[in-house]
């Protein structure tokens, strides 16, 4: 399916997409702060510059957009135009995510991912359940985890 806007408009729209302080990230941070959790944002000294870092718990939290990170859920669909470009770009993002996860774990940190589909879209479990599962991870002993929407 061809794009419904011209290339210049699409470029402007894509350049406006944020990489930090996204709405899902802000919602999760606000809820965790209200529960008493204190954190640092985008710590440069932790591999992958996680969205949220809990230094006392040695936990790195990543809030991933399903499209940009190629998540297998209803929110991810490969665009109909420039398909090969997008397949390669998203493939590189997936590979980088795997590398970052390994680096975080080998640096002695715990790794947790919150997928966008947990917070919005068909099958979302909502903010309350997402935060509850995140807190369960933070208080537990597991080294790696994620929360995603109901599939």
Image (spheres, helix red, strand yellow):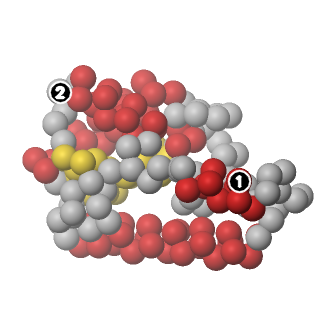
Q: What is the residue that sits farthest to the front in this orientation?
A: 8
Q: Is mark 1 in CB contact (under 8 Å) with mark 2? A: no
In the rendered view, does 72 fall on the left or right side of 26? right
The label shown at residue 125 is none
Q: Position of residue 49 (x, y in %)?
A: 29, 61
Of marks 1 and 2, the one in the foreground:
1
How far from the left and from the top, in percent, is residue 3?
Answer: 82, 56
Residue 58 picture location, percent across and down: 16, 54
Q: Is residue 101 above or below residue 55?
A: below
Please name the residue shown 70% across and 46% down the image: 74
Residue in the foreground of this view, choosing between 8 and 14:
8
Residue highlighted by disc 1: 9
> In this rendering, is residue 75 above or below 78?
above
Q: Residues within 10 Å of mark 2 (few under 14, many from 20)?
A: few
* Mark 1: few/some/many CA within 10 Å (<14, 14-19, 20+): few
Q: 123 or 4, which is in the foreground?
A: 4
Mark 1 or mark 2, which has the lower sequence index? 1
Query: Which residue is tagged 2?
Result: 36
Instruction: State the separation of the CA atoms marked 1 and 2.
Output: 43 Å
Query: Can you tell which quarter of the image residue 70 is in?
Result: bottom right
Q: Quadrant of the C terminus?
A: top right
Q: Is residue 93 above or below residue 5?
A: below
The residue that appears at 21% across and 57% down in the rendered structure is 43
Say which of 81 and 97 sits in front: 81
On the image, the x and y values in percent for residue 9 come to: 71, 53
Res 73 visible: no
Q: Is residue 55 visible?
A: yes
Quadrant for the N terminus, please.
bottom right
Query: Could you tell me which residue is drawn at 24 percent across and 72 percent down?
Result: 106
Q: Secondary structure at mark 2?
A: loop
Q: Among all residues in the image, which is located at the extreme left? A: 56
| Rendered image quadrant of residue 149 | top right
């Amino acid at each position: 399916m061809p794009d419904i806007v011209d290339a210049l408009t699409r470029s402007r729209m894509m350049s406006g997409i944020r990489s930090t302080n996204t709405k899902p990230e802000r919602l999760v941070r606000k809820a965790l702060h209200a529960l008493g959790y204190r954190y640092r944002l985008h710590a440069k000294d932790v591999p992958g510059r996680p969205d949220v870092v809990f230094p006392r718990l040695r936990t790195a939290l990543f809030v991933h957009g399903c499209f940009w990170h190629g998540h297998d859920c209803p929110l991810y669909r490969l665009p109909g135009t420039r398909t090969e470009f997008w397949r390669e770009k998203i493939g590189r993002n997936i590979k980088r995510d795997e590398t970052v996860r390994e680096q975080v774990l080998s640096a002695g940190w715990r790794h947790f991912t919150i997928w966008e589909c947990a917070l919005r879209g068909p099958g979302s479990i909502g903010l309350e359940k997402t935060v509850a599962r995140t807190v369960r991870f933070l208080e537990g002993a597991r080294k790696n985890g994620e929360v995603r929407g109901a599939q």
